[in-house]
Amino acid sequence: MGYKDLRFKEDAVFLVTGGAGFIGSNLCEAILDMGYRVRCLDNLSTGKYENIEPFTANPRFTFIKGDIRDLDTCKEASKGADYVLNQAAWGSVPRSIEMPLLYEEINIRGTLNMMEAARENGVKKFVYASSSSVYGDHPTLPKKEGHEGKVLSPYALTKKVDEEYGRLYKTLYGLDTYGLRYFNVFGRRQDPDGAYAAVIPKFIRQLMRGERPTINGDGRQSRDFTYIDNVIEANLKACLAPSEAAGEAFNIGAGGREYLIDVYHDLCKALEKEVEPVFGPARAGDIRDSNADISKARELLGYDPEYDFAKGIGLAIGWYKEHLA
C-alpha cells in the first residue's frame, strides 16, 4: 500500500518547510489531494514559486514566505500544526564544500529552530529530511542504520547533527521526531538546471538538447535511486508511526542498486538518443556506492515502497518529456 489510503483526522494541519522545493512541493500536492490542510514555509532561495503556484487557489493551502533561520517565523508557522514535515535545507555535497558556514546556518540551526518551535507548539510529529550521506566512508553494503562511517562533506555532517538533535528532542523533551535518510530521490519537478543539479534530471535535459553529459568518475559508482512517491509515503507513514519509533533515523530508498553508467544508457534508450558521455574527475565528498537496507523503516514505519527504479524512471522521463519539450 502506498500513501493515498492513509487517514488522518479530518481537520489535520501539515506544515511543510521547504514546501516550494522538489520534495516539498510534491508533499504539499499529495496532502492537498488527500483533503487535508497544508502550510508551506519557504524563503524561495532554492525552491520555486512556480512549483506551488497551482495550489494557491486551494482554500486549504497557505504559503508563508519565510526563513527557518528565524525562530519567530518558525514558531508562527507551526502554531496549530499537527505535523511538521521539515524539508527545508540546502542540498548538494559539492556546494557544501564551497560554503560550509551557510550549510551550518541553514541545515543545522534552521532545523533546530523548527524542532524548538514544534516542541513549544505541541506538534504531534516532527518528520525531517536526513540523507544517505551520513554513512560517509563506511564500506558495507547495503547501508544499515547503526553502521555509519566518517562523514565526507559539510552537508553530510549537517544531517548527522540533525539526527542527534532529533534523538535529543525525543529523549529530553518528548517530541516525536523521525529522521528520513533519503537515498538519491528523483522524479517530477526536480530541477535539471544549474551547476548543482541532481544527475538524473540533468542527464535528461542534456540528452533532450542533444548535448553530451559529463559523468563524474568512471560511471561504476552505484546509487539506490528512489522515486518521489516512495518518499511521500515515508513522510506520511512517519506521521502515523508509534511514539516508540521516534527519536530514530530510517533509510528511505527503494532497496535497489543502479550503476550510474547503466542509468545513463537506460536514459539514452528511453529518449532514443545515441550520445557517448564525457567522463570527468570524481567529485570530492561523494560516497562511491550506496544502497539501502530498508528493513527498519518497513518494520517500524510500515514503509513499503511501491516504485522500483524501472517504474519510477519511466514516470520521470514522461514528466520531463511533457514539461521540458
Image: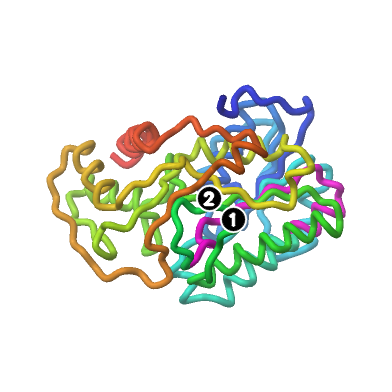
- The amino acid type, in three-letter code, at marker 1 is Ser
Residue 285 image point, x, y percent? 43, 70
Side of 73 where 147 appears, left or right: left
Residue 93 image point, x, y percent? 46, 66
Tell me the residue at 37%/62% (across/down): 288
On residue 130, which mark appears?
Answer: 1
Q: Quadrant of the C terminus?
A: top left
**Badge 1, how many Cα within 10 Å: few under 14, some, many 20+?**
many
Q: Is residue 7 magenta?
A: no
**Badge 2, how many Cα within 10 Å: few under 14, some, many 20+?**
many
> Foreground residue, 52 or 198?
198
Of mark 2 and mark 1, the one earlier in the sequence is 1
| Residue assigned mark 2 | 182
On residue 199, which mark appears?
Answer: none
Tell me the residue at 45%/33% (across/down): 307
Tell me the residue at 72%/46% (across/down): 84
Q: Are marks 2 and 1 in contact (CB under 8 Å)?
A: yes
Q: Is residue 291 above or below residue 71?
A: above
Residue 98 image point, x, y percent? 46, 76
Tell me the residue at 58%/77% (across/down): 101
- The amino acid type, in three-letter code, at marker 2 is Tyr
SS class, disc 2: strand
> Foreground residue, 189 or 118?
118
Query: What span is in magenta?
Result: 114-136
